[in-house]
Amino acid sequence: MSGTKDRIKVLFLCTGNSCRSQIAEGWARHLKSDVIEAYSAGIRPIGVNSRTIKVMAEAGVDISGHTSKNVDELVGIDFDYVVTVCDNARQQCPMFGGRTRHVHKSFDDPYFAAGSEEEIMAVFRRVRDQIKAFVEKLPEILTNGK
């Protein structure tokens, strides 16, 4: 980062780019846009989950315009950090060259939540809030790698 006005480029990566990485990108854009240029992608994108959009809207963050992207679509962007938010993405994360550092922080996948609609939404809300707590600590937590 050559100057104080430069934002760090962070890619949040999960398997489907449906829930967790979308939530992380949404929070980073909402809370940290002054210091972070946020992106999200998936190893095998499946589309943005409608419940993901709903729980973020409940928290005042509009991600309805987000699209689900394959990580291959972002080749050529010189990321400062790639944050894998699930173990599968960590294992299958492609190599990023140059100065890119890898940080792993796994969150439960609300996509697989079961039960009534309210029970499923409770899982989405819990994961949303856990990811918010993580993003609130950015970018400092990235340099520590924890």
Image (cartoon, rainbow, N blue to C red):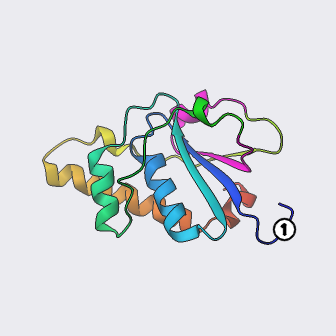
Q: Position of residue 39 (x, y in %)?
A: 57, 49
Q: Position of residue 60 (x, y in %)?
A: 35, 70
Answer whether residue 67 is magenta in the image: no
Identify which residue is drawn at 32% across, 43% down.
49
**Closer to the camera, 113 or 20?**
20
Q: Position of residue 3 (x, y in %)?
A: 84, 68
> In the rendered view, does 134 fall on the left or right side of 9?
left
Disc 1 designates what residue? Answer: 3
Task: Identify the residue at the far front of this view.
Answer: 65
Which quadrant is the N terminus positioned in? bottom right
Label 1, residues with CA under 10 Å away: few <14, some 14-19, many ≥20: few
Identify which residue is drawn at 53% across, 36% down.
87
Above-or-below relation of 110 to 70 = below
Identify which residue is drawn at 55% across, 41% down.
13
Disc 1 marks a residue whose amino acid type is Gly
Picture mark count: 1
Task: Identify the residue at the far left of this view.
Answer: 116
Above-or-below relation of 116 to 89 = below
Q: Which residues are magenta?
A: 77-95
> In the rendered view, does 77 fall on the left or right side of 2?
left
* Quarter of image, res 137: bottom right
Is residue 19 among what the camera can see?
Answer: yes
Local SS, label 1: loop
Answer whether residue 93 is magenta in the image: yes
**Closer to the camera, 130 or 23?**
23
Is residue 107 among what the camera can see?
Answer: no
Q: Position of residue 29 (x, y in %)?
A: 53, 63
Which quadrant is the C terminus positioned in? bottom right
> In the rendered view, does 43 fall on the left or right side of 78?
left
Identify which residue is drawn at 37% across, 62% down.
62
* Quarter of image, res 139: bottom right
